[in-house]
Image (spheres, helix red, strand yellow):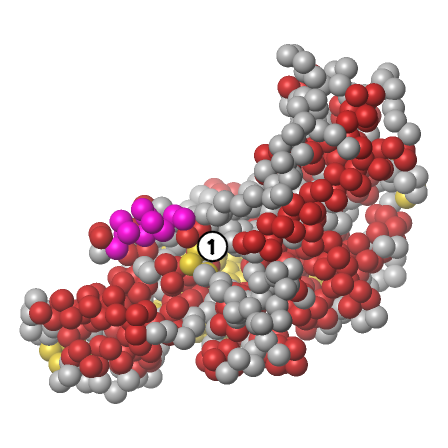
Amino acid sequence: MRVLIAAIVSGGMGLIGSPTWSCAADARPTDGPSRKFFEQYCQTCHSGTKPKGDFRVDVLARDFADKENREKWLSVVEKLKTGKMPPKGKPRPPAKETQALTDWIDGQVAAAQAARNLLQGRAVMRRLNQAEYENTVRDLLGVDVELKDVLPVDSTAGGFDTNAETLHVSSYLLHNYLRAAERVLDEAIAGGPRPAQVKRRLDVKAATRQQGVSRPVDDGVAIFASDLASNIQTVLWDFHTRNRGKYRFRISAYAYQSEKPVIFHVNGGTNDLGVEPYLIGHFDVPPGTPTVVEFVTQMEAVRNIRILVDTGMRALTLQRTGAENYQGPGVVFQWIDVEGPLGDSWPPPSYRMLFGDMSQAPAADNPERREVVSRQPLADAEAILRKFTRRAFRRAVTDEDVKPFLDRVRARLDEKASFEQALRTGLKGVLVSPNFLLLRETVRPAGPEASPHDGAVLDDFSLASRLSYFLWSSMPDEELFQLAGEGRLSQPETLEAQVERMLKDPKAGAFTENFAGQWLGLREIDATLPDYQLYPEYDDILRSAMLKEVYLFFDEVLKNDLSLANFVASDFSMLNQRLADHYGIAGVAGLGFRKVPLPADSHRGGVLTMAGILKVTANGTTTSPIVRGAWVLDRILGSPPPRPPPNVEAVDPDIRGATTIRNQLAKHRQVESCAACHATIDPPGFALENFDVIGGWRDNYRSIGNGEPVTVAGRTMRYKHGPAVDAGDVLPDGRRFRNIDEFRQLLLSDKDQLARALAVKLLTYATGGPPTAADHSKIEAIVARIRDKNYGLRSLIHAVVASELFRMK
């Protein structure tokens, strides 16, 4: 196996690197429309031995095929279009001359990128990311194995962890893939005896330890408060899982000393301090009437569950006063049933996916283990490997594809290894092969009528993989394999039908989680923790509701092919009571989410005003129009602002109530190098200033210094009402708005741009790289296709898949 790793690393890095290529342009000094422009407006400062900004225009080459040189030309375009250059006080060119030069540069860049795409394709080879790997081994072997401790977290580029620029392979990573392969094969082959199943009822009184926040009652234990940070929680010390698998829990509970339902949540955990507790779910129970809450969850070995009630009572305070006579709300837990690991057969389905009806026998070296046995080891190994490699490599396989792995099996058999031991060697080799780890896209052979300008069209197997990893973050299923093998998947009507089928499949939940989660930045929800002094109402229930609203909303728009304009402004959202209360919307009860029409006077509607989005675009104490404005420009409008100039200090909003962020940015805008960009960035950010760090509506900033006292439900808050919020501003084109409602209407005036921006994000996620300047006309074709379909999101996905950019390398 070390030889295999060495071969992949020494020769395999080229598999995912970018091949060299060149364009017809030579590297002589600049001429054409740029020479006269630079001489008249730029070379005074940007030439010679000490150019300003260490940038010389007099030596810029016309070799647009060279990436580093091309980036320099694009920086010229950016500075001209934003007005940064020429600087104030210097002669400025007429708008027509600037437009002529930027158009020429854009054309040269597009031509160079088009030549590159024809030569090697736009999308380069990449490896599976962590989520794709886990999903792929799940569907390949029928096992659900946690591998996050083995495979490192993937970095992102262009907003997504599917970007080929970051998905490289190293010797360290390959060693981890070996460990992962061993783990998943152990789980799939399941050579041990059937795990003993647990089915028992836990007495909550006996199974828990009291921590000063609960008291026994006639039919159970009443718990009034919990605090995970202080480790005040109800742990079922009497129960630990012995084996990994799915477990069913049934909890009988009811709200106590309350006229309303009370919420509790369940965490999974262990006594090992190195394992963080993880949320299983939130639940609510009605007052007085015992209610059984049931859930099934995947658990590793040596895990237990912890129960935390969410009454709002501070656990440390209750510990000091005692719970014996406490009259506030709580939850009575009567009993807890545990059953698992769940499973109807043994060996499990994963065994049959590999071996079919082949039998097992006690292993020679360990009679307690059972191994698969064969009377024709080499023939059976070849049949198993041929079937396995076809699915693992996601294409038809040849004898040459199977031979290296069969040779390894033969060598192990010659060493007197058992059939299963030998076969494991072959299977492990498949799971660390570049053909499995890498998305190696191939193209159709060019026909006799093909033109060199036609580009490289993906063959049907590569198209099947691109489609399945786009919508499922996993390998193709048998129907896609069959259609690809028949050469029918690329037919337009077949491709459209498959997209519909796949979007209806439960596996499409991965698209919502992975695409929407990254497009909208929801993975950063825990990057900051709101300051408890300023935002005491923030808790885990609200955090969970924030995330769920966005994902359910995205699903609703996708399922019903609603206009993507809903992402900017909608007349509904997906709410439960906790989130509705946070938004000030009446008439929503319980933890369950539902589609809720928004009141006519509501400022909500669309992702811009969702608490989850507003949370990830703020830090724990303040909001910044710069951060939120840049987010809107990038995620919604597809026009990310350039990086700030070096040596420019960040603007930290004042929380003492002495000034406002508007006043601070007014001074910042006076800095010459900052003014042009802030005229674009700040307005969308100011439009969102009525929303605080956790997405609540505010007319005034919260202050810990100056301001008016605040009382909520008879309790004086630690924060005060600071300066009033002003959410108005003017866009670079002169259009003004007074608040978020007017700003959203301005955004809706250009739905083509909303569609254009989202199409680019979808293609970047789907193909592993962003479209280039050469792809402008193809993006416009996608937008045109959905214009008469009310810009439906589902229609947009169909248009993206049908586009040349998706179907070509």
Please name the residue shown 19% across and 66% down the image: 408
Quadrant of the frame with the N terminus? bottom left
Q: Answer whether residue 5 is magenta in the image.
A: yes
According to the picture, the residue beneath numbered tag 1 turns out to be 126
Q: Main secondary structure of the magenta part?
A: helix
Q: Is residue 401 visible?
A: yes
Magenta run includes residue 714: no
Residue range of the region highlighted in magenta in the rendering: 4-14
Task: Determine the residue located farthest toward the bottom in the rendered image.
Answer: 357
The quarter of the picture where residue 347 lies is bottom left
Q: Nearer the viewer, residue 87 or 646?
A: 87
Q: Image quadrant of residue 802?
A: bottom right
Q: Amino acid at mark 1?
A: Arg
Residue drawn at x 62%, y 32% as measured from the top left: 27
* Residue 430 falls left or right of residue 749: left
Q: Is residue 430 left or right of residue 70?
A: left
The residue lying at 49 percent from left, 72 percent from top is 461
Task: State the image quarter where residue 336 is shown.
Answer: bottom left
Image side of residue 270 versus residue 491, left or right: left
